[in-house]
Amino acid sequence: MKPVAVLFIALLAASFASGQEDVPLFQTTAELALFDVQVVNRTTRTPAPPLQQKDLRIYEDGVLQEIRTFSRDELPLSVVLLFDLTDTSQPVLGRLANSSIKMLAHLKPQDEVAVMAYAAFTRLVGDFTTDREKTRKDINKAAGMHEISRAFFNEAVYQAAMQLRKNNNSGRRVMVWLTDNLSSLPDLTAQAYYRRLAPSWTAHTEDEAIRALYESGITVAPLLLVDPAALERTMHRRAGESLYFKFAPPGDARKYAAWTGGQALQYDGKDVDGRMAQIVDELRSRYTIGYRPTQQKPADMFCKVRVALAPDAPLQPDEWLILAPAGYYRK
Amino acid sequence: MFGLVFFTHQSRQCFARVVGVTGAIILSAGVIFPQSASVMDDQEAARILNVSPWVRIVSPTRSSDPFQFHETTVLWESSVVVRQALIKAYGPGSVQQYGEAYYVISVSFFPVASGAPPNSHANSAEELAEELLELCRASAHLTSGKVKRPALKVAPYLRGDQRILFFLFPRDPRIDPGEKEVTFEIHLPTLGGGVLDLKARFKPREMVYLGQPDL
């Protein structure tokens, strides 16, 4: 997914050389809204059989758009591996790291990976690189970190989004987020505490984080640890905090995935290798579709996007679910 | 501007004549008492929210152990003067609208997570949170004279850095402004079997704002 990317002819030609019929290749100012889309079985959540361009419809603010580009796994991936360092995630960090390293084998050589880690503070452990050996070291470094503190999810997502944006890569942007999804209330008391520790410390809100994701066209793909013992152990504390979540949303990996068209997978501490591989394979099998918006709209306006199966598509909507971002901001 | 006329029981007689005259002048001039916080300065607002008849700073205690809980602020939030002070201190969006049917008491930093709902069926933190709210509601009373009012509703709110619980009590029957004392109490069953007690005593006779009882 990469909304309203201004792509020049050379990039268009290079990226969409195959399967294109009517992209006006010699239009240097053409704005193209690009989105990563996945079609999965509603029950099994497994990807659908291969689809063609004519099988999908895309609407912007309710208006049908003409799909100008359609591809599958042609653009390279820019992946941020985001590690949750909090206490409840610590017991599985080593296994997650090993699985993440194995997962690298599922990437293409041109795909690049950065490693970040967070609890109360978000850190860039290793910047984007296609050097797998460096990424392996970065992953091991992240797995060796430990921070006894609260976990501020929105800030981590925001910082990871900024890292992906700064990278300025023309490929698909993805956040593979390894977490137990147990966030902390980002109230003012907590913020004051961490600002005393580090004056430059920031705590972006959920709204700011989701906007950063939309602006950079990032798909969030969380791998969620489900640990019943940790859930039971922390339930009272989390219940007390959750009373106030609606006033200061702490960030929910499932919601971030839903908003950006990603898919949240769960694991119980076992078969981490399989789940990590599944995430990458799922990302690989996504469709990139693009259109030129037909309506003039002011810059900075949020445009809602809806992707649907065409009426004559071989798949039925009651069986198949389309995962797509909720929209994008006009530039 | 009229400024804030603020009474304590002790000073009431001293100010009564002044307020009476002021009130008569205002009413005869057809002026409505100001409802905005603009007449209140920051110091007055802070005083009302920290040291006034409408606020009590108390620490909960637990019967089973000597654990020292964080101090809680218990605020008579349905009073006009407190609402004006809150608007002054935190802005217009800081006051919740619950209508005139309730006495509203807010408690900040109450250790709600200590509660142990009986026969809990909660499978998630969110479900447990709902059970904790109901437990708080069932554990709270507002007593004046022989009338013991159960809380009708409990609602959470985040105001600045304060985690707040609002306790709503029916205004019917009304509290007699001449009542010597009104007591807000919570007796919360907690994890480990003890009971967490919180008690705040208010004096309605002192809770007078602009010459009127203000509850």
Image: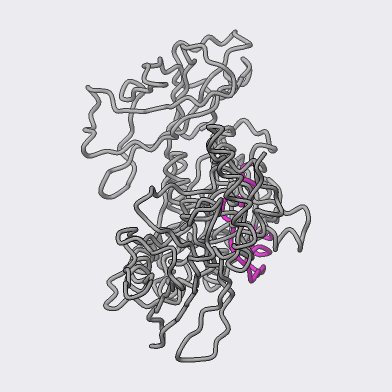
Please check the rendered image and state whether residue A154 is part of the magenta-colored stretch, yes or no.
Answer: yes
Instruction: Say which residue appears at 33% left-offset and 33% top-offset.
Output: A50
Nearer to us in this view, A207 or A131: A207
Instruction: Say which residue appears at 59% left-offset and 8% top-offset.
Output: A26
Query: Does B38 sit left or right of A98 as displayed?
Result: right
Which corner quadrant holds the C terminus of chain A? top right
Q: What segment carries the magenta color? A: A136-161
Q: Could you say which quadrant of the image residue A226 lies in?
A: bottom left
Residue A108 in sight from this viewpoint: no
Q: Magenta span: helix, strand or loop, mainly? A: helix
Relative image position of residue A207 (x, y in whole percent): 54, 41
- Vertical relation: A108 (above or below) A203: above
Query: Does B148 sit left or right of B14 as displayed?
Result: left
Relative image position of residue A31 (x, y in whole percent): 57, 16
Q: Residue furthest bottom?
A: B65
| Number of numbered discs visible in the structure rendering | 0
Residue A304 in sight from this viewpoint: yes
Instruction: Say which residue appears at 51% left-offset and 60% top-offset.
Output: A179
- Vertical relation: A90 (above or below) A142: below
Please check the rendered image and state whether residue A288 is part of the magenta-colored stretch, yes or no.
Answer: no
Relative image position of residue B162 (x, y in whole percent): 57, 60
Nearer to us in this view, A246 or A174: A246
